[in-house]
Image (cartoon, rainbow, N blue to C red):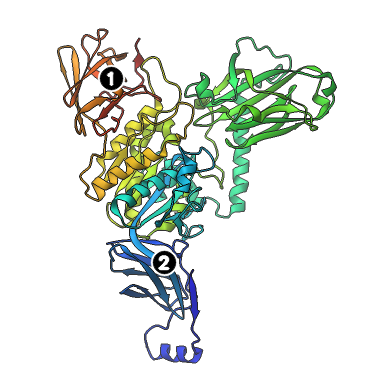
Amino acid sequence: MKKIFVAAVSAFLLGFMSQCGAPAAPATDITLPALFSDNMVLQRNQPISVWGKAAPGGEVTVELGDRSGSDVAGGDSAWQVTLKSLPAGGPYTLRIHGAQTIEYQDVLLGEVWVCSGQSNMEMPLAGWGQILNYQQEIRQAKYPEIRLFHVEHATSPAPLADVSGSGWQPCSPTSIPEFSAAGYFFGRNLFRNLNVPIGLIQSTWGGTVAEAWTSGQSLKDLPDFAPAVRAIENGPVSQKELEARYQQELQAWYAQIDEKDPGFPRQGESWAGVKVSTSGWQQMKLPGNWEQAGLKNFDGVVWFRKILTLPAGWAGQDLTLDLGPIDDMDNTYFNGTEVGHTRGYNTPRHYQIPGKLVKSGRNVLAVRVIDTGGGGGLWGEPDQMTIGLPSGASQSLAGTWQYRTALSADNLPPLPQSPAGPNRPTVLYNAMIHPLLPYTIRGVIWYQGESNAGRAYQYRSLFPTMIKDWRQHWDEGTFPFLYVQLANYMATQDQPGESDWAELREAQTMALSLPKTGMAVTIDIGEADDIHPKDKQDVGKRLALIARNKVYGEDITYSGPLYKSMSRRDGAIRISFTHADGGLVAKGGKPLKGFAIAGNDQKFYWANARIAGDQVVVSSEDVPDPVAVRYAWADNPVCNLFNEAGLPASPFRTDDWPGVTMGH
């Protein structure tokens, strides 16, 4: 554990030395960021940065093995020492000398990677989601030379100097359960193949957008984000002021929605009323994500209703109502009267119904759901949806409900962002990335994009901006930035069509034009009904394959086929690929699936596709003069093009047509 040794120094002697122009006295009040602790891993073969705070004017000396360096704390108390590089190895003791000496024990030199992004990078081995074979994976996670540092959630309108974290932990069945599964499997693969210590820094937050992870300096160069950044920079700085302004903005936001919502007519009953006509309403089985139940890619306001027949003995009695989690916000009504409202997509709803509203026989339960992005609806488990007496008698609410859409997202005003919320521009960069600077790292692995899928075209510029932003601020040059392309998710479509998720994958593929980037394709390991696929082993492995080839020089196949070019001939289109290592294959020996083709009318039809060497020949009787091909262009495509190394081809399109018409 960290040790501190205090040296007694005469105040008179220090003053005399200062007056005589002697070297700076040993520093007092030395502190270091949370990233420095026992069990840490420092980056091998690169200059090592060590920094912190001390009383101004005092000298700090840092020692690691036979490396040492000194700095004098400035007027802002900051000091920084850069040590010459060391090869992999250890354990070492890192010593920081001043009027006191701080020691960090069991320090290793190895490979340090930052693991960042939203929930699919945050998803731990145990707990929510539970990855494949999680119990066995946890039992076998005995790798003391893999070290873990977990950055706690935090936001800030301005860059912070430190993060909150519990310090570096050796990987063990005790420390691994709540750590990033994708990050762990990536690090484990590197450790097994490089045989050097591995340090993993997890800085993640589920459901977050890329602009929250990008600095204001860079976002101000993007017109879509510059106004929001300036508003944050010029806005209130105290938490109390921020919260007060947010509550005012939120009340105004709800008022605007209420004004637009046809469920609140200017005359007559609201859609929560007991006598309102439900002619024309549709049916949906709940609980469940409404994207899976027919409201594909819908964000906005939806009303749900269910007629309840309650026992005569319940009349006049207070009842408890449970609805499970609702994505994102709800207003819940019983017989036309609001009984509760909650904001929070993962918060189970638990409301009290006063007895004066409860009748025997027919009663009406109505829930207005406001979803601002991603999945929507009442999405918990059936046993979370009940109504009953506090004494225990209850009825299940799972099953068929009526629903009606009220407002699409296009008609919603911009949602105010909570000062404690993570989805404001810059706030996660400020609190969870900036404090990591200038800790020396090898590179970054990143899994994010789901929360930006509704703005996929914008991601073409936002994502590369974020990558370049991190590289600029880390000041280590063009370090490797490896990322995961979005997996397949949601319902499979019978016909070719448009897809926000496909466009987001396209934007991710475009980022490969940046140097030292790599993309792990996961179009084959997603799950239709779960945005958090359980197979994180393959995610980590595919990221590690990229690192082992592009970073560590191992001669292995690291990518599936990527679209290269097309040519037209004899009523067909021939598609050429890079990374067709060992040849192209249709997985499972079945005919190729997932290809669609179109002519100048821009109508896509499912195509016949066959492999010809390192090309795929695509054609259709419905399209005698084809001009464009798409592959795996859907939220959850049925597709099976791989290379011999077993890595899937990335989805692609040869056209750039917006909003085309689908064929049959």
Q: Amino acid at mark 1?
A: Leu
Tell me if residue 223 can be seen: no
Image position of 471 (left or right of 216): left
| Kind of residue indicated by mark 2 | Asp
Residue lying at 31% horizontally and 28% vertically, measured from the top left? 651
Location of residue 138 in the rendering, given as x and y in whole percent from the top left corner: 47, 46
Measured from the top left, where is residue 50 in percent x and y?
A: 38, 67
Q: Give the residue number, with chain letter if any, for mark 1.
A: 592
Eyeballing the image, is 463 above or below 314?
below
Q: Which residue is mark 2?
A: 106
- Residue 355 vs 309, above or below: the answer is below
Using a 10 Å C-alpha cutoff, classify the residue at mark 1 as few (fewer than 14 neighbours), some (14 to 19) or many (20 or more): many
For the residue pair 77 and 540, the one nearer the viewer reads as: 540
* Residue at screen point 48% across, 41% down: 134
Residue nearest the observer in this picture, 78 or 263 = 78
Q: Is residue 662 left or right of residue 582?
A: right
